[in-house]
Amino acid sequence: MDGRPLQGASSVRGIGSYERGLLAGFAELEHPPKVSLLLSAHQEPPGGAPGILRAQTRRIPVIHPTLQPVADTVFVARALRGARADLYHAIEFGQPVRTRLPVVVTVHDLIPFVMPRDYPWVRRARVPGLRLLRRADAVIAVSESTRRDVLHFTRTDPERITVIPEGISPVFHPASNEAVQRLRSKLHVEGPFLLAVGTFDPRKRIGVLADVVRRVRHDHDVAVVIAGDQGTFTRFVTDELDRAGLGEHARVIGHVSNDDLVALYTAAEVFVFTSAYEGFGLPPLESMACGTPAVVFDNSSLPQVSGSAACMVPDGDASAMATAINRLLDNPAERDRRRTEGLAWASTFTWKRAAELTFEIYEKVLGR
């Protein structure tokens, strides 16, 4: 398995969460597979790995980020030569141009191809991996939306594409009152607030979020807290919040630990998700797993992932989203109903189930 998403910056992003969750799910199986990881040559190996992992010996060279996805087709093929394995699972492209092993590829999203103007260099770098998809013995799509994108942008045989939803880490559950108070004191967050989570690149639409919060504040004295490493988008995010006149009513707190994130989800009045496109979209599910209702836009994978437990509004309609949030803030009974439905819905997304279905793909590919 390509273990590089467990290293470096990817380890705290969705791709890292996926691989950690899948490995944890494998460890819960009655007869778990033994997994070896291909790792980056210049980064520390991941810590806290489950017992199903074998010793790591094979490393992938690191080159310039814009060239890495192209070179990976050769680097991975070379690393797999002589590997004592039944198959290879590529977690984020990383598919070899040629190998004797059966290949399974997980596709999380094809956003650089869906939105080429927003991600021009990423799109160019991913073209070789996209073209190789049709050679894979099996493709796992994390949502029906991603499956449709694979069919649209590649000539992959639809019979070889299987939808396996992601799971939620068991750390996401309602935090105690004590944990919430510690979090509020630590971050100096007082009073009611709306929560947004993620890196607000253009797809996440910080301008829309700012407009939504500005509209909600006409009726309710709430702040907005944004959690997640904004990286090169930090100035862009803060400028949009300032332009909306939010100023002291907005907090951009950067990356937080899982414990703090759970407490944030629990403490928030409403979770707000303004993304224009998601391959899967874990944050709304994580929010619901912590007992906080989510309001999302109707696009991409979000209807499948959020179900009827979340409040869904027409895509991009800031007024409709603000109205939905106000309705939750004004109606405690509605919030309680959404909380109950959200907890039940989120509980159906487990990594053990994802691992069981993934293992079935392995067996099918191997003809067992």
Image (cartoon, helix red, strand yellow):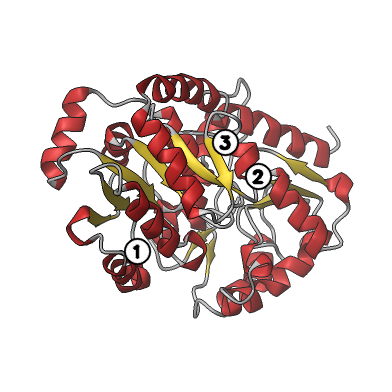
On the image, which quarter does residue 189 sit in? top left
Marks 3 and 1, the one that precedes in the sequence: 1
Q: Residue 318: horizontal and vertical position, in percent? A: 48, 54
Please state which amino acid type lies under the numbered disc 3.
Answer: Ser
Q: What is the CA distance from the residue labelled 3 to the residue labelled 2?
A: 14 Å
On the image, which quarter does residue 10 sit in? bottom left
Q: How many marks?
A: 3
Point 20% across, 29% down: residue: 179
Q: Residue 161: horizontal and vertical position, in percent? A: 80, 46
Residue occupied by mark 1: 230
Residue mark closest to the camera, 3 vs 1: 3
Residue occupied by mark 2: 142
Residue occupied by mark 3: 306
In the image: residue 172, left or right of residue 52: left
Residue mark closest to the camera, 3 vs 2: 3
Viewer-side residue, 254 vs 214 = 214
SS class, disc 2: loop
SS class, disc 1: loop
Q: What is the CA distance from the residue labelled 2 to the residue labelled 1?
A: 25 Å
Q: Residue 272: horizontal and vertical position, in percent? A: 42, 45
Please state which amino acid type lies under the numbered disc 2.
Answer: Val
Does residue 229 sit above or below 85 in this rendering?
below
Residue with the most extreme front position? 218
Crowding around mark 1 (Cα neighbors within 10 Å: few <14, some 14 to 19, many 20+) is: many
Please state which amino acid type lies under the numbered disc 1.
Answer: Gln
Point 74% across, 57% down: residue: 149
Q: Which mark is residue 137?
A: none
Marks 2 and 1, the one that precedes in the sequence: 2
Point 39% across, 26% down: residue: 291
Viewer-side residue, 333 vs 149 = 333
In the image: residue 262, left or right of residue 79: left
